[in-house]
Each structure stands twice: as structure tokens, then as C-alpha cells.
Image (cartoon, rainbow, N blue to C red):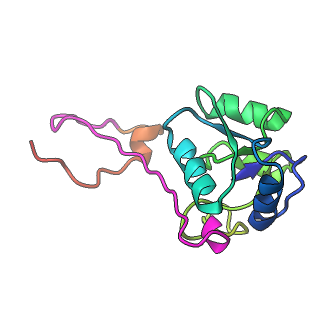
Amino acid sequence: MLLNPSVPAATVAEFIAYAKANSEKVNMASAGNGSAPHMAGELFKMMAGVNLVHVPYRGQGPALSDLLGGQVQVLFAATPGTTDYIATGKLRALAVTSAARAEVLPQLPPIADFVPGYEASQWYGISAPKTHRPRSSAGSTAKSTLLSPIPE
């Protein structure tokens, strides 16, 4: 859960209070309608009882640009691509959407610490035909692990 630093909230509880006091005035960016970050934001809105205005973008990149520029105030974003902005103070991270703290951002509590029962996670899978022979490389193939073959 990322905020533009102009938002006067340092915790999830403070953000909820701010959003309730500014109903329909806080813009929530997403990576697009139906994306995992969009669903994480909608779940937060429902469970926290806040009314944020959804602003869909065509991917996380454009949403991050407008969050950095202050056109939107909050973004539920995938961690990759955001940690440098957090470390430099260009964005304020309040919490993670997973049920437990994230290894890459251990200082951030889960939203569930403030909104009981909240959890929003996503994962990605890679698949290929059974006849596919992975090539050894320094790219994604080397970083991928075949977990279990899918029977035909």
C-alpha cells in the first residue's frame, strides 16, 4: 500500500481516518480494471469502510508515474519496481497486502494488523509444453523452477 508523500498519514489507521474524512476525494490508482492490485484496493475499500475513487491505468508503470506526480494518492502495487521509490522517500509505504510481513520490506506490517482478516496476494506461473527443453541462460529460464509437470 503506497501513498504519495503529500498524504498526511503515516499508518494504515491514519490513512483510513483521512480517507473517511475525505470521502470520494482520495484517488486510488490501479494497474487496470480487474488487475490483482485493483482487487486488493477494492477489498481494502470494502473491509475498511472507505470510499476511494478508482482510477484505472494501463499497467503499474503509468499508475506509479501519476502517484509520484501527485495526481493520485494511493496505489496497491506489486512490490517489484517500487522498493527504490520507498527507499528514497519518493513514496510512502504503509503496509503489505499479504498476511505476513514481506522479506523484502520487513519494516512494513500487514494491512491485517489494522483491518482484521484482510489479505490479498498474487502469484505468477510459467508453463510450457511437455516437449519444451529449457535453455540454460542468465535470464528468466535460469531463475525459474519447474514445480510440477501438468499431465496431458
Residue 144 in picture, x, y percent from top left:
39, 47
Q: Is residue 125 magenta?
A: yes
Instruction: State which quadrant residue 63 falls in.
Output: top right
Q: Compared with residue 114, is residue 91 higher up or lower down, i.e. above or below?
A: above
For image coordinates 48% across by 37% down, the residue present is 34
Tell me if 113 is positioned left or right of 7 in this view: left
Q: Exactly how many numbered labels are in the figure?
A: 0
In the picture as drawn, the residue positioned furthest to the left comes out as 152
The spot of residue 113 in percent (x, y) is 65, 74
The image position of residue 107, as x and y in percent, is 73, 68
Q: Is residue 52 magenta?
A: no
* Residue drawn at x 80%, y 61% as measured from the top left: 17
Q: Quadrant of residue 101?
A: bottom right
Q: Residue at x 90, y 46 (%)?
A: 6
* 21 or 127: nearer the viewer: 21
Q: Is 151 placed above or below 57 here? A: below
Quarter of the figure that contains the C terminus? top left
Main secondary structure along the magenta-highlighted residues: loop
> In the rendering, at what x and y percent does residue 151 appear?
11, 47
Q: Residue at x 85, y 58 (%)?
A: 9
- Magenta region: which residues? 111-135
